[in-house]
Image (cartoon, helix red, strand yellow):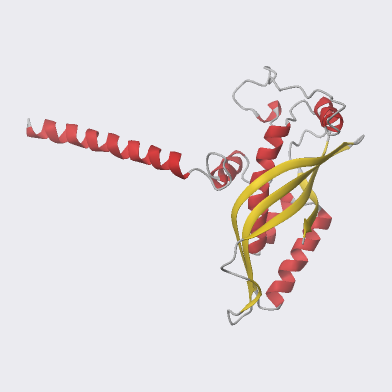
Amino acid sequence: MGDGFQFIDIIFFAMIAAFLVLRLRGVLGRRDGHEGDFRSRLKDEKDKNPDNNVVKLSEHDDDMDDGSQDRPKEMKKIVVNDDDPLSGPLAAIQTADPGFAPDDFLSGARIAFEIILEAYANGDAGALKPMLNAEVYANFSKAIQDRELAGETLEDTLIGIKSADIVEAEAGKKTASVTVKFVSEQINATRDEDGTVVDGNPTTVIEVTDFWTFSREIRSRDPNWTLTATSSLD
């Protein structure tokens, strides 16, 4: 009898622990308002393809491995609206790439934004290379090298993404491009080799506006988009 009650107690406490974990996950959520942690989502992508660091910014039936390739995914059709200048090019992208959906794209773009910022701050050029085109990678890589040669370290903490909106889109004959405006809160500070702050402020949260352009070959079976241009508002 005593062993039986102990067994029941173990199950009872395990149920309580599981409930508390679920409650904590529900309360904490993500910094940018999306459920789950972007590192976990990146890990899922890495588990599927360990040699690929690129975040997929849209869903494609080709990526499914559960036997559902023959079942077309129902995608909300983009309707061209004369009052919305973006609807035309976005609809053209979707026509060429039926797996494209603006909401899914923005979800992936937010994840890519976080990953790229973190890799750049950490000086991880290897993680950046598959996510950027040659020109953007060269700029990021040079900035990392200059920082290392100067003995400086960058502290870049992304507090959260306040908004991410598509502001430009273009469907060319071969390439599709989508520009996203990110408004985020960050803490940025650069320290020299002695730890002295030479730029920024490690205790001040600032609002940063970035414009990032992602592109991919429309006809390619590769669903990955790469970062092809960046700019920011001072």
Residue at the extreme top: 71
- Tell me where residue 74 sits by quadrant: top right
In this view, the residue in front, 21 or 58, is 21
Task: Where is residue 220? Give x, y as percent.
Answer: 81, 34
Q: Residue at x 18, y 35 (%)?
A: 9
Q: Quick check: 139 left or right of 11?
A: right
Task: Where is residue 67? Give x, y as percent.
Answer: 61, 21
Q: Quick check: 191 left or right of 231?
A: left
Quadrant in the picture for the C terminus: bottom right
- Tell me where residue 187 sits by quadrant: bottom right
Residue at the extreme bottom: 194
Q: Quick check: 36 left or right of 121?
A: left
In this view, the residue in front, 211 or 133, is 211
Q: Quick check: 103 left or right of 227?
A: left
The total number of labels drawn is 0
**Vertical comparison of 156 with 56: above or below:** below
**Vertical comparison of 48 with 74: above or below:** below
Instruction: Look at the image and tell me whether residue 222 can be seen.
Output: yes
Q: Residue at x 63, y 20 (%)?
A: 68
**Vertical comparison of 93 with 182: above or below:** above
Q: Residue at x 69, y 26 (%)?
A: 61
